[in-house]
Image: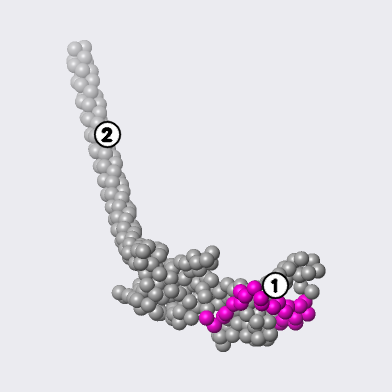
Amino acid sequence: MKKDDESFEEIFSDISKEEKKSKNKRTAFIVIGSLVYGALILTAVVFSFLHSHKHSTSRKTSSTQEIVSSTSSDSEQNEAEIFARKLISDEKEYQFSWEVQDFDGLRFDKNLGGTSLDAIISRYGRPDSGEGWIALNYGKETPQIRLRWHSIERYKYAYVSLVFEKFKDEYKLISKEYYNLNSSKLPIDTEASRVFTWTQAAFDSLLLENKEGNSQTGSTYEEIISLYGPPQNQNLSAEDYISNLKVSYVSPKPDESNMKLRQVDLEFIKIDSGNWYLVKKDSVNLN
């Protein structure tokens, strides 16, 4: 009986040893599995960090480039603005000496540049206002400035506005505009004793040119003043290639029948030939 008990104890001991071995194997597998899983997690974290850092660096570089570019652009714009303001004349020295003939003699070119800024300043003096900016031409940033000469004389307001662009180291004219300049070639008649000869029939006989001025069939300014004399008021304006002339004939005294002034208003455009063609007409109180 004792022998059987010993055999049972031996058997139990063997079983316990086997269970311990199995438990140790499971523990080993768990430990190894945990290490492998941890390694995978660590690898993923490192990869994610490196990837995020790369994109962050890229974004930071891009942002820095934008700031540098913006700063450069702002610097050029400030330079153009400062340059334009430095050209402004002192109030005591400012003079307005522009006439239509002067304006017509200015050459402008948007691609190559026209009359130089130095030549204009030398001839007509410094402006009384100016501004500068950066323009984008064919993908290239270029400094531009606008200078203005103003005049208010005997309640008559006039101005010349010129735009220049920097070509290499020199500013040249690329656009021009004026309003209400005087012209010795277009006289006016302000005499109180003038005769008003306009009639409704004469007004109706005037022919209008099309707005483009390419038909050349409208009445011309020269034809009209040869028949009715110079107007009493005129207003000249131009922008680049387009020139406009507005004139008014006003009776020196009211009409006896209704005690109202008679008036004819005419508008002309100037074409390449140099002639002024009638494009619009209006009248008040004609007989």
State the image coordinates of residue 257 (x, y, percent, origin top left).
81, 69
Callout 1 crowding tier (Cα within 10 Å): few <14, some 14–19, many ≥20: many
Q: Quadrant of residue 270?
A: bottom right
Helix, strand or loop status at disc 1: loop
Query: What residue did someone put label 2 on?
Result: 30
- The residue at the point 45 percent across, 79 percent down is 102
Residue closest to the eye, 180 or 38: 180
Q: Identify residue type, mark 2.
A: Ile
Q: Identify residue type, mark 1.
A: Ser
Q: Tell me if residue 198 is in the magenta stretch.
A: yes
150 displayed left or right of 226: left
**What's the colour scheme?**
one colour
- The residue at the point 40 percent across, 65 percent down is 128
Q: How many marks do you count on the picture?
A: 2
- Magenta-drawn segment: 184-207
The alpha-carbon separation of the residues under discs 2 and 1 comes to 114 Å
The disc label shown at residue 157, or none: none
Farthest residue in the front direction? 193
Can residue 121 be spotted in the picture?
A: yes
Instruction: For the N terminus, give its image quadrant.
Output: top left
State the image coordinates of residue 15 (x, y, percent, origin top left).
24, 24
Query: What residue did someone put label 1 on?
Result: 251
Q: Quadrant of residue 208?
A: bottom right
- The residue at the point 33 percent across, 62 percent down is 82
